[in-house]
Image (tube, grey):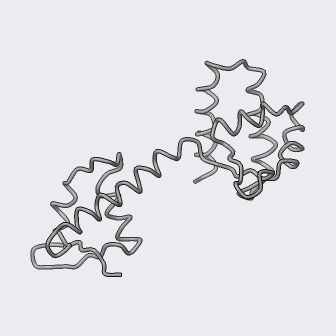
Amino acid sequence: MFFDDYLCQMERVVKRLEEKKDSDILEVFKWFKSHVLDNKLEPSIEHQELCTLLALGGKVKDEHISLLINSGLLTRQLIDSNIYWFAIPNIGSVLKGLSQGRKEVLSLLNRRRYKEMMLAPLEKKLLRYSPLDMRFHLRDLIGSGHLKTAKTPTGLVVRVSKD
């Protein structure tokens, strides 16, 4: 994800929280943007380093860090609870749609007699479990090697690759 897109996601979170929370606690997002994101390029950060960088903006409380976690900007590492990963807010629904769409396309092709289908009618099919477009999933599966294309006199055929 590009840094500017990440900042836009962060601003959306702040706008959503402005309605519910008071402005004093929302200062942590400004501190996070100016002191943490500008100085830390790795995908994770230790608790002590996070507190030190946030303290450059003001007095850090546990509820500030909890707010960053609950807003989806940070997640705790499962192995070491002293380390946080930078996270993308609301990424779960996109990942769910991606995995369910992959399963649905592969299932559709695996139910066919020769596990293949012409590309044009396949692109027109609608997916039930994914908000993403069929063409997106086809490109994803072809790129990852799960599907292969073959040229025929009537057009392109998409088939499940044999592992």
Total marks in image = 0
x and y percentages locating residue 55 in the rendered image: 89, 37
110 versus 83 height, above or below: below
- In terms of depth relative to the viewer, which is nearer, 152 or 76? 76
57 versus 108 height, above or below: above
Q: Looking at the image, which residue is at 32% across and 48% down?
A: 129
Which residue is outermost to the front? 79
19 versus 162 height, above or below: above
Left or right, 41 with respect to 55, comes to: left
Residue 154 figure quarter: bottom left
x and y percentages locating residue 58 in the rendered image: 88, 31
x and y percentages locating residue 147 in the rendered image: 31, 73
Which residue is outermost to the left? 154
The quarter of the rendered structure image containing the N terminus is bottom right
x and y percentages locating residue 94 in the rendered image: 46, 48
- In terms of depth relative to the viewer, which is nearer, 112 or 98? 112
Residue 27 figure quarter: top right
